[in-house]
Image (cartoon, grey):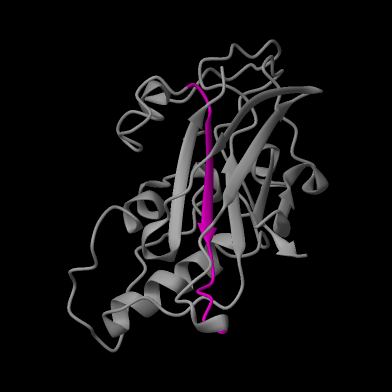
Amino acid sequence: MRDQVDIAQIISWNGGPLALPSRPWSPVHHLTDYGESHYLGPIKGAQPNSQAWVDGFPHEPWLQLNSYFAFAFKNGHYPKVHQDKIFVWGRPHPKAATASHDSVPRPNNWELVGISYVSVEIEMRVLISVFLLYRQMTSFGSLFSPLRQARYVYHRGNTQSHGISRLDCPNYLTDWNLTAL
Amino acid sequence: MRASLYRDENLVANVDASELGFYFNPSPEVYNFNVLVAMSSSC
């Protein structure tokens, strides 16, 4: 069965203040299911004939992102970020696209993509999410060097379809979702 | 799908998912509701 990847976990990580008490362990509720595009580690091992939509779609960067939040859950505060990093993820086609040569129809509940999982993108047709971890600057006596500009550009073929910039980034991280029609 | 992060006009992080083979196709031949995830490299 083809299904959307459950990114609710990723998005919700950044959904509010860290309220959980510190604890020596942090569970990651995750079941590797290539058939439903649920996986975090490297793609290897037997697949349930899911190669068509799994191969070439790595998720390993989420492991690094996960370690950032795992630290926070364990220690009650976010770790210091030593290097700016950008995490991006996106789907290869609009959710409402009609495939021209697929004998298998859209998965059940395909229309929920972007509604129940990412509340800020009700009209989203394809999800592109950009997540930044940015380091705190302590040199020159300043607390940090604010982000003057952060932008990402989405290309559809040779056409730029979206760009955005934002100046405020609380908690040393920020995420955006945008609509690409 | 590309993203760049600048500090004071200095490029500090950049990621280009096309280097991993990502291609957004508005008219796909087959459905794929998976996502490709990419992370920036150091600049």
Asked whether, in this view, residue B12 is left or right of residue B35, the answer is: right
Q: How many marks?
A: 0
Using the image as rendered, state which of residue A19 and residue A45 is in the foreground. A19
Whole-percent x, y for residue A54 in the image: 65, 45
A138 is within the stretch colored magenta? yes
Instruction: Give the quarter of the figure containing the C terminus of chain A.
Output: top right
Q: Residue furthest bottom?
A: A24
Whole-percent x, y for residue B42 in the image: 74, 67
Q: Is residue A70 above or below residue B15?
A: below
A18 is within the stretch colored magenta? no
Report the residue at 67% width, 35% height from top: A153
Residue A81 shows in the view = yes
Residue A48 shows in the view = no
Instruction: Identify the magenta region.
Output: A125-139
Report the residue at 40% width, 61% height from top: A30
Asked whether, in this view, residue A30 is left or right of residue B19, the answer is: left
Report the residue at 37% width, 59% height from top: A170
Whole-percent x, y for residue A34 in the image: 55, 49
Q: Is residue A126 above or below residue A134?
A: above
Q: Is residue A51 above or below residue A141?
A: above
Asked whether, in this view, residue A36 is left or right of residue B20, the answer is: left
